[in-house]
Image (tube, rainbow, N blue to C red):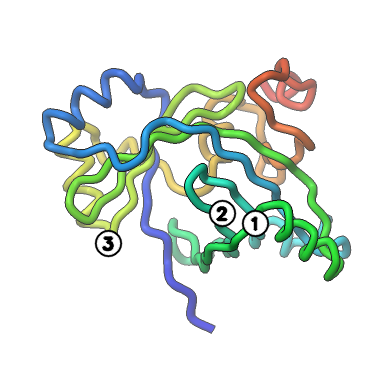
């Protein structure tokens, strides 16, 4: 089955206030102010320690104005992931449905996100616990996001690709391929730096 690709790039260790100034100068508009987002990651119990666990992700996310359920699969021949996403009515009810069919959740995660737009390109300002702030640019194709990155003063050679683990690996230098923020059962802003990340600094 051919899945659509999520075309996006991250720029790490950025000051969000500086980025907001650049966005305003570039004519971007705010489509959603900074809000708390919460998510649960799910898997089949038998896949927890298999290779498929590293390449596929099921995510239920409360985005503040909608609830999304997403399947992501890493591509071996592209920096961009394949993704299918739909909206659902209730975060808690969907969790119970996933439990009922035998899935389990292995990580609860909080983040904060502010969304801007330039034409058909979306720029998000992301905050995660225990991590420097970064931005993500997503669009219909690579040339579109490259153009917006240049307009905002970012060098494409500094772009990073992949999940939020890409940002954590850039900050916690001992993180290996199999290490992930999803190995922390609860990722909350109110919690101190977990021992898992302390060991990877």
Mark 1 and mark 2 lie on one chain; the one further toward the N terminus is 2
Q: Secondary structure at mark 3?
A: loop
Q: Quadrant of the N terminus?
A: bottom right
According to the image, label 2 marks what residue?
A: 67
Whether tag 1 and tag 2 are in contact, CB under 8 A, the answer is yes
- Tag in front: 3 or 1: 1
Name the side, left or right, on which 120 lies relative to 94: left
In the image, is residue 189 above or below residue 180? Answer: above
According to the image, label 3 marks what residue?
A: 141
Residue 179 visible in rendering = no
Q: Secondary structure at mark 1?
A: loop
Q: Quadrant of residue 100?
A: bottom right
Which of the two residues, 190 or 79, is positioned nearer the viewer here? 190
**Residue at x 33%, y 35% (from the top left corner):** 158
**Residue at x 68%, y 27% (from the top left corner):** 188
**Residue at x 27%, y 25% (from the top left corner):** 19
Q: Secondary structure at mark 2?
A: strand
In the image, is residue 22 above or below residue 142? Answer: above
| Image position, residue 48 (x, y; %) | 82, 56
């Amino acid at each position: 089955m051919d899945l659509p690709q999520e075309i996006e790039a991250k720029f790490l260790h950025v000051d969000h206030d500086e980025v907001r100034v650049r966005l305003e100068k570039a004519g971007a508009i705010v489509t959603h102010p900074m809000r708390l987002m919460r998510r649960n990651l799910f898997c089949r119990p038998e896949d927890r320690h298999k290779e498929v666990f590293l390449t596929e992700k099921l995510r239920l996310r409360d985005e503040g104005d909608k609830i999304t359920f997403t399947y992501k699969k890493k591509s071996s021949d592209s920096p961009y992931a394949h993704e299918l996403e739909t909206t659902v009515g209730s975060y808690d009810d969907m969790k119970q449905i996933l439990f009922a069919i035998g899935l389990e959740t292995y990580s609860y995660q909080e983040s904060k996100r502010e969304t801007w737009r330039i034409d058909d390109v979306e720029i998000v300002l992301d905050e995660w616990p225990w991590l420097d702030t970064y931005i993500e640019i997503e669009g219909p194709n690579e040339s579109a996001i490259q153009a917006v990155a240049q307009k905002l003063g970012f060098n494409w050679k500094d772009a990073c690709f992949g999940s939020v683990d890409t940002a954590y690996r850039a900050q916690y230098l001992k993180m290996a391929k199999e290490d992930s923020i999803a190995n922390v059962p609860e990722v909350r802003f109110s919690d101190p730096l977990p021992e898992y990340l302390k060991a990877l600094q």
